């Protein structure tokens, strides 16, 4: 049975009540979860599973078989009994930083139009995108423009399209190394900005903030040459 992904509808759900479907040292499967499973460059969430008889520290969240999420126990952690009702508690400070970072990378992508994204990684301390680009803008220029988008307080929303709609609009896909997940017939689009004039619109399964001013000030920490036309842009949350 697939795990219900609560974060798809509510990325701000810090705690949810769920029931244990299976529990092994490889991971605990719940019927529903607020934990994001590692994918698309975004790390899996960490936190706790609490129940009447104890608690389990979650060291990672991974994709399991048949569209389930594996809540990976920390070393030596006790497992909850199958069928037990648990409360899944996120490490919210970490998750929220990842949400801010992820949305920031979408904004960064919008500032370098036409350049394919060859790689990327989201982290709580720093994040990066690699662009197929001979000459990138300067750090100072990107930082200024990025923070202007943040301060504009654009709304962040989502909608779903069919795989056929995506195929008819290949320009929506910026990533050259990874394609949007397929298989259930639907693709999730994340939009930043107004529906009739989006700042950014692309397929994404990750978690994001509701409005861009929630990100806070961002700084382009460095731009590196990683090949003939591969430029790595690293960002950090300024002053944190």
Image (cartoon, grey):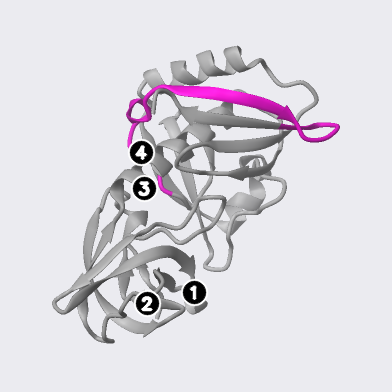
Does the magenta portion include 118? no
Label 3 vs label 4, nearer the camera:
3
**Residue identifier under label 2:** 29
Instruction: Find out whether the residues at labels 2 and 1 contact each other: C-beta distance under 8 Å.
Output: yes
Residue at x 56%, y 28% (from the top left corner): 108
Label located before the other in sequence (2 or 3): 2
The Cα–Cα distance between marks 4 and 1, rounded to whole angstroms, is 26 Å
Please give the range of residues in magenta. Answer: 207-231
Does the magenta portion include 221? yes
Please tell me how crowded label 4 is: few (under 14), some (14-19), or many (20+) other residues with Cα within 10 Å.
many
- Point out the image quarter for the N terminus: bottom left
Q: Position of residue 181 (x, y in %)?
A: 58, 60
Please tell me how crowded label 2 is: few (under 14), some (14-19), or many (20+) other residues with Cα within 10 Å.
many
Please tell me how crowded label 3 is: few (under 14), some (14-19), or many (20+) other residues with Cα within 10 Å.
many
Q: Which mark is residue 64?
A: 1
Q: Position of residue 157 (x, y in %)?
A: 38, 40
Label located before the other in sequence (4 or 1): 1
Label located before the other in sequence (4 or 2): 2
**Residue identifier under label 3:** 95
Kind of element beneath mark 3: helix
Residue at x 50%, y 21% (from the top left corner): 146
Answer whether residue 200 is visible to the viewer in this image.
no
**Residue identifier under label 4:** 209
Answer whether residue 148 is visible to the viewer in this image.
yes
């Amino acid at each position: 049975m697939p795990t219900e992904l609560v974060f798809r509808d509510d990325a701000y759900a810090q705690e949810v009540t769920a029931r244990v479907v299976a529990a092994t040292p490889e991971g605990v499967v719940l019927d529903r979860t607020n934990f994001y499973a590692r994918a698309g460059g975004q790390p899996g969430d960490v936190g706790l599973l609490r129940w009447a008889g104890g608690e389990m520290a979650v060291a990672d969240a991974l994709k399991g078989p048949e569209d389930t999420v594996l809540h990976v126990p920390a070393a030596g952690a006790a497992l909850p009994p199958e069928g037990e009702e648990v409360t899944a508690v996120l490490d919210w400070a970490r998750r929220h930083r990842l949400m801010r970072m992820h949305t920031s990378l979408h904004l960064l992508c919008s500032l370098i139009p036409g350049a394919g994204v060859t790689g990327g990684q989201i982290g709580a301390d720093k994040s990066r995108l690699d662009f197929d680009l001979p000459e990138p803008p300067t750090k100072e220029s990107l930082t200024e423009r990025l923070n202007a988008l943040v301060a504009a307080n654009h709304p962040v929303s989502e909608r779903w399209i069919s795989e056929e709609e995506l195929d008819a609009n290949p320009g929506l896909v910026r990533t050259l190394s990874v394609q949007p997940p397929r298989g259930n017939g639907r693709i999730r689009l994340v939009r930043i900005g107004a529906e009739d004039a989006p700042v950014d619109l692309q397929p994404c399964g990750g978690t994001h903030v509701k409005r861009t001013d929630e990100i806070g000030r961002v700084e382009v920490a460095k731009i590196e040459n990683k090949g003939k036309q591969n430029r790595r842009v690293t960002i950090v949350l300024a002053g944190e």
